[in-house]
Amino acid sequence: MSNPSPLHAVHEALGASFTDFAGWAMPLRYGSELAEHKAVREASGLFDLSHMGEIELTGPEAARALDYALVGYLSKVKPGRARYTMICDADGGVLDDLVVYRLATDHYMVVANASNAAVVAEALRERSTGFAVEVNDRSATCALIAVQGPTSAEIVRKVTGADLDKLSYYASVPATAAGHDVLLARTGYTGEDGFELYSEAEHAQDIWAAITEIGQDHGLVPAGLACRDTLRLEAGMPLYGNELGPEFTPFDAGLGRVVKFEKPGDFVGREALERRKAAIDNAVVGSVVKTVRVGLTGTGRRAPRHGYPVLDGDGNPVGTVTSGALSPTLGHPIAMAYVPTALSEPGTALAVDIRGTTTPVEVVELPFYQRPA
Amino acid sequence: MSNPENLGYTEEHEWVDLGDAGTATVGITVYAAEALGDVVFVQLPEVGEKLAAGETCGEIESTKSVSDLYAPVNGEVVAVNEAVVADPGVVNSDPFGEGWLFKVAVDGDTDLLDADAYNALTKED
C-alpha cells in the first residue's frame, strides 16, 4: 500500500484523484488539470510535494563529503543558497538530479526525487564514510508544500512575513508559517516564480490552511502532479526516468554544466565522466554518436509521447522522445527528445512516429515557455 | 454521477444508447472520463466505416495518456460528433450527453453489460 502524505485528509476533502507515485499516494488532480495548469501560469497553484526525499548532512566535513559524493562543487555554495546538481554512479550514469540547499557552513539538505530517495540516502551514507559528517534521511517526517505562480510572492509574503526582496531565486531562509518553523526557498519546477516550504509533517495541515486562506484573494488553487508534469515540460525541465537515468551521463543529457571537474580531489564518477566528455568532444563520426536533448514542436493536437521514435527526413529512426504533451499554454504539441547533434539545430525538420503515423515536428530551443519578465 | 439505467456498457468503459431504433449512440462513461483526466484529442471512425464489436475504431487522448476506442457493437458508422473533435473537453463536462462520440447502424445482436453489471465492474477498483 502507498504511504499517505501528511496532507492526505485535506486532499480527500478537496475531492482529489490520487496516483501512486514511488510508493506515495499523491494528488494527481483536484478537478481539471488544464485549469490547474492555467492557474499556475496566470495566478498561483498550491502543491503538496511531501513525497520528495529530504536528506540532511551535518558536520564539519559535510561540504567535503558532498564534493566527493556529487558532481557539483557544493563547498563553493554560500550558506542560504541552493544548487541544482546530480549524483552519479562510478560509471558516470545519473542516479538522480538534486537540489542541494546549504543551510549553514556545516549543514546541507539534499532534496531527491521520491523514486530515488532511498537510493540517494544510501549512496550518501556510503560515500560519507571517512568524513566527519552525519547523514539523516528525513523524508518520512518532512513535508513540502509549494506555491508557484505570478501571485505566489504576494501570498508567501503575507503568510510568512518574510522579506522576499532579499530572497533571490535558488536561495532559502528560515521563516515561520502558521506559527511553525519552515525552511522557505525560492525554488520550483514550473517555470514560474515560486516558493517551497519545508516543514515538519505534523505542521503541514496548518501551513496548507494558512496559505489557502491568504491565497483566496490571489487566485490560488490546489494543483496536482498532472499539471506539475505539463508545467515542467513547458519550462524545458528534465524529469528523472524520462530525460535522466543511469543510462545517460550528464553530458549525454546536455547538462554537463553541472559537472565541476575544477573542484579539488576525487569524486564518484570523475574518471568515467572525464572519459565520456573527451569522447564526446573528440567525437569522430561513427565512433561516438553524441546525442543531445532538444525541444520539438508540432502542429495539430496529437502529441509525441515518451518512447516514440524520432525520424529523420528519410524516415530513419534517429532518436527517441522522452516527454511530450499537448502544451496547455501554447496549444500545440511539444516534446523533449534525444537526437544526434547534427540534427539538433533549431529549425531542423524531423518527424515522430506517433502510433504508426509519421508526424512532422521541428527542433526548437528550450524552454518552450518562458514567463514574462 | 451515476451510470444511467437505460444505457448498455462495455468493459472498456463505453456506454451505448440503443434507444433510437436500430441506431446505437456511443460514448465513454464518467468513470473513464475521470480516469483519463482532461481529454485533449479524439480520433473518431469515419461515417460509412464498418465496425466489428471489440475492434479498435479510434483514439482518445488526455494530457497524460492515450487510449483506444473500441467498437461496442457491429455495424456501420452513420454519424460522428464533430463538436467533440473541435472541443474534446466536452467529453469531461458531459460524458453521457453532449460528449457522445459516434452513432452506429447496428447489425445483428449486441452483447453489452447493464448498468448494474457495469456498476459492479467499476466498484472493484
Image (cartoon, coloured by chain):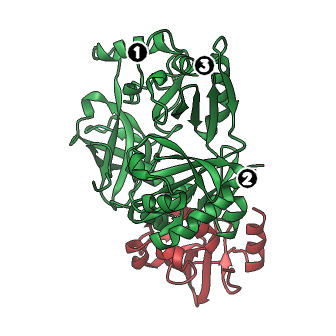
Q: Earlier in the sequence, mark 2 or mark 3?
A: 3
Chain to which the residue tagged by mark 2 belongs: A
Are the residues at dot 1 and dot 3 in contact (C-beta closer than 8 Å)?
no
Q: What color is chain A drawn in?
A: green
Q: Which of marks 1 and 3 is nearer the N terminus?
A: 3
Chain given the colour red: B
Chain to which the residue tagged by mark 3 belongs: A
Q: Nearer the viewer, mark 2 or mark 3?
A: 3
Residue at 40 percent of width and 46 percent of height: A166
Q: Identify the residue position indicated by label 3 in the image.
A: A60
Where does the image place residue A342, in percent across and percent down from the top left? 25, 29
Where does the image place residue A315, in percent across and percent down from the top left? 31, 39
Q: Which of marks 1 and 3 is in front?
A: 3
Residue type pointed to by label 1: Phe
In the rendered image, residues at marks 1 and 3 fall on the same chain: yes
* Marks 1 and 3, how far apart at CA: 23 Å
Picture quarter containing residue A338? top left
Q: In this view, does A333 lie above or below B114?
A: above
Q: In this view, does A51 lie above or below A265?
A: below
Q: Nearer the viewer, residue A161 or B119?
A: A161
Q: Identify the residue position indicated by label 2 in the image.
A: A202
Residue A263 visible in the current orientation: yes
Residue at 62 percent of width and 34 percent of height: A116
Q: Residues within 10 Å of mark 3 (few under 14, many from 20)?
A: some
* Marks 2 and 3, how far apart at CA: 30 Å
Q: Identify the residue position indicated by label 1 in the image.
A: A261
The quarter of the picture where the C terminus of chain B appears is: bottom right
Q: Which of A327 and A60 is in front in this view?
A: A60
Q: Which of B7 and A273 is in front in this view?
A: A273
Residue at 75 percent of width and 74 percent of height: B119
